[in-house]
Image: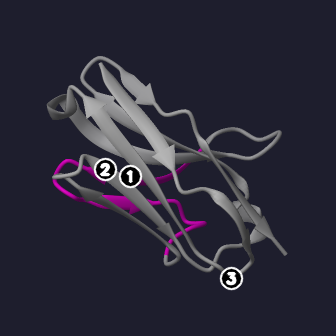
């Protein structure tokens, strides 16, 4: 089992920044990938950024150049640094951990960007 707890969401003005954190606990060694997803009201959940065990990253086109995913292996934590935020970034942001056999999700953290 893996447990994920997100934090760092909030309300910010357009152009501002936030840093989300996802703290993992449990069977950490089984995690291969960690991702950030987001879901806006009435829309499907969307992949935002991915980081592999080896630190390779990938981003959705809509956030490239603005968001940065990183991980602190010592703290078992993945971060999402979000800069130059736009109103369309407003969503609930979820952390996901992928292991062999199943995925684990956090409870989500709300990010609201005002114009």
Q: Quadrant of residue 17?
A: bottom right
Q: Which residue is mark 1?
A: 50
- Name the image quarter holding the N terminus: top left
Is residue 89 on the magenta stretch? no
- Name the one closer to the observer, 58 or 11: 11
Is residue 54 on the magenta stretch? yes
Q: Is residue 18 left or right of residue 79?
A: right
Where is 79 relative to 103, above or below? below
Residue at x-position 77% and y-position 41%: 43
From the viewer's perspective, is the residue at label 3 or at label 2 nearer? Answer: 2
Q: Give x and y (percent) for residue 74.
A: 16, 52
Q: Give x and y (percent) for residue 87.
A: 78, 68
Residue at x-position 45% and y-position 38%: 5
Q: Which residue is mark 2?
A: 77
Residue at x-position 66% and y-position 74%: 85
Mark before the other along the chain sequence, 3 or 2: 3
Secondary structure beneath dot 2 equals strand
Q: Which residue is mark 3?
A: 15
Characterize the local packing of mark 3: few (<14), some (14-19) or many (20 or more) Cα atoms within 10 angstroms. Answer: some
- What range is drawn magenta here? 46-64
For the residues marked 2 and 1, what is the alpha-carbon distance in whole angstroms? Answer: 13 Å
Q: Give x and y (percent) for residue 38.
A: 61, 47
């Amino acid at each position: 089992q893996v447990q994920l707890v997100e934090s760092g969401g909030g309300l910010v003005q357009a152009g501002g920044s936030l840093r989300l954190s996802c703290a993992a606990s449990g069977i950490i060694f089984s995690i291969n990938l960690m991702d950030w997803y987001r879901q806006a009201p009435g829309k499907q959940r969307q992949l935002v950024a991915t980081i592999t065990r080896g630190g390779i990253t990938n981003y959705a086109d809509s956030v490239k150049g603005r968001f940065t995913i990183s991980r602190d292996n010592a703290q078992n934590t993945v971060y999402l640094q979000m800069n130059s935020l736009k109103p369309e970034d407003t969503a609930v942001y979820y952390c996901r951990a992928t292991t062999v056999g199943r995925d684990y999700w956090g409870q989500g953290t709300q990010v609201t960007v005002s114009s």
